[in-house]
Amino acid sequence: MSYELREHTADIAVEATGQTLAATFEAVGDGLAAAMCDAPPKEGDRFGLTRTAESREALLFDYLDELIYQRDVRAVLPVENEATIREVDGDWTVEASARGVPLSAITAREVKAVTYSEMQLEPVADGWRAYVVFDV
């Protein structure tokens, strides 16, 4: 699993890969955290979240949107993302957790929102690839 931050006009993008869909979600989540902070400290407690959507792409959007929401509500930077994904009767669900680094412990750049603009989520030869643009 890996990610790279990509410049994107006035925004920032994350390109991520993983051997599984869940690993790719985790990598995009870690890329989102990297877009906000270069080196978060090791403090913070884990928290969980669950999201369900009608497609894999909608699930990725909702998952990242929830990470940003949790950042705002809990005043934490979600790092060390872990995810499990399942599909049941056409609905996709992610059960995830992240370590929440207190925003008071870091200097963070603001990421306002995840966008559908140019979003890609596709199988590749060695797993999955995602490309997501964030509004900054």
Image: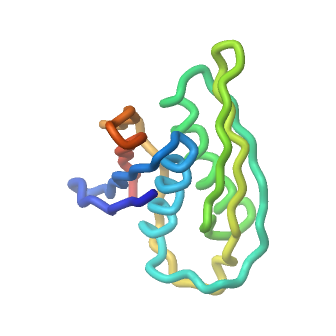
**Pick the front one: 5 or 70:** 5
Residue 80 image offset from top left, x and y in percent: 61, 67
Residue 129 image offset from top left, x and y in percent: 37, 42
What residue is shown at x 57% (from left), y 33% (from top)? 59
Looking at the rendered image, the quarter that the C terminus falls into is bottom left
Q: Does 24 appear above or below 54? A: below
Color theme of the render: rainbow
Quarter where residue 72 is shown: bottom right
Residue farthest toward the left in the current orientation of the protein: 9
What residue is shown at x 24% (from left), y 60% (from top)? 7
What residue is shown at x 59% (from left), y 55% (from top)? 68
What residue is shown at x 67% (from left), y 70% (from top)? 76
Residue 92 image offset from top left, x and y in percent: 64, 26
Residue 27 image offset from top left, x and y in percent: 49, 56
**Pick the front one: 106 or 53:** 53
Looking at the image, residue 43 sits to the left or right of residue 60; the answer is: right
